[in-house]
Image (cartoon, grey):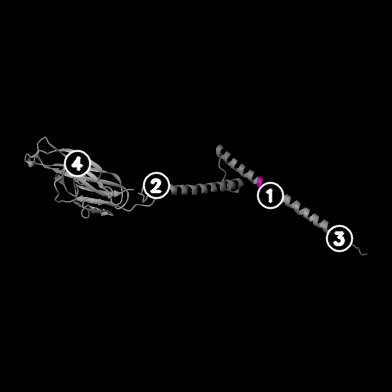
Amino acid sequence: MAVSISLPCLGLVTLAAILIQTIAVAVSFMYFNNVLNTMQETFSRSSVSCLMKANLRSAEGLIETPEEEKKSDPCWQVTQQLQYRIEKIMAERFQKEMSTTMRSKLTGGLPILTPGVRGVPLPKVAAHVTGVVSTREPPTTEGSRSSRGYLGERITAWEGQRGLSFLQNMELRGGELLVPRAGLYYIYAQTYFRLPSIEETEGETGEEEGAQLVQYIYKKMSSYPVSILLMKSSRSACWPRGQEPGLFSLHQAGTARLQPADRLFITVSNASTMEMDGRASYFGAFLVG
């Protein structure tokens, strides 16, 4: 016997089937979502409990678990991964900080090319000039000032190329060192004196009289007409008795900030008694910052 189903009934059956399927999908989604949240919460709690358990073990000083047991324990795996991650982050940070610190230490000890720019080494600017034997004019006294605006007699007989002397990115002109660039310079000088004995002077100098030995380091600027005294060194020396001459030396050193085209020169009192041995009388300068 044939069963006849009307079109409205067929539509209702189809709609009911779709509705039931939709409800089943929604229920399944809610169920799996709830299961996933539960698993995440359980994992989070288990991780915290693993860490707490590990801390408790460390604090109580319990006997270590065998290696095979550790590897099969989920808590051990969690703590190992966390420890590995922490060690990696700390190692990267330590390496970065140490690199910065060491770079600062290394470049901090080097001169700088321009104020505010670190790590760029300065070019080598230096000079060491030595005395040579030459004919000089009679010296002026310490208390008088020459017509050129400086005390003492200027020393022009310096050697800059041979022997112990050298010039590196500096020039020697007329006994003056020409500064090539702005910066802080270390400047030094030594002059050596040989005072004749009283017998050699043939009574020209009294026995009670002495010599005032003075050494000056001057700077001459193109923008200023008068030479500027940078350093001064002096000592009192008695004329020696007997046949041997008296030997004395003056040495001084210091720093000064110089500009391009500045000139450095040396003057002394009693220049006629100065010994121009290159190992005893010399002066120089070099750039330090």
Question: In terms of depth relative to the viewer, which is nearer, 225 or 212?
Answer: 225
The circle on residue 214 is: 4
Which of the two labelled residues, at mark 3 and mark 2, occupies the earlier sequence position? Answer: 3
Q: How far apart are the two marked residues, 2 and 1, measured between alpha carbons?
A: 54 Å
x, y percent for residue 250:
20, 42
Taking the magenta stretch, the answer to whether it contains residue 55 is no
> Looking at the picture, which amino acid does disc 1 mark?
Leu
Q: How many residues crowd mark 3 within 10 Å: few (<14), some (14–19), many (20+)?
A: few
Reading the image, the residue beneath label 2 is: 105
The image quarter in which residue 168 lies: bottom left
Question: Residue at (23%, 51%) from the top-left corner?
Answer: 176
Q: Which residue in the protein does label 1 denote?
A: 36
**How busy is the neighbourhood of tag 4: few (under 14 within 10 Å), some, or many (20 plus)?**
many
Residues 149 and 44: in front is 149
Image location of residue 158, percent across then percent down: 20, 51
The answer, for residue 69, to whether it is visible in the render is: no
Q: Label 2 vs label 4: CA separation? A: 41 Å
Q: According to the image, label 3 marks what residue?
A: 10
Mark closer to the observer (2, 4): 4
Label 3 vs label 1: CA separation?
39 Å
Find the magenta span and give its range.
Answer: 37-41
Find the distance from the CA under tag 1 to the CA under tag 4. 95 Å
**Residue 217 x, y percent position in the rendering:** 24, 45
Residue 187, x across and y down, in percent: 27, 46
Q: Quadrant of residue 1?
A: bottom right
For the residues labelled 1 and 4, say whether their Cβ atoms are less than 8 Å apart.
no
Q: Which amino acid does the dot numbered 4 rest on? A: Val
Earlier sequence position, callout 2 versus callout 4: 2
Labels 2 and 1 touching (C-beta < 8 A): no
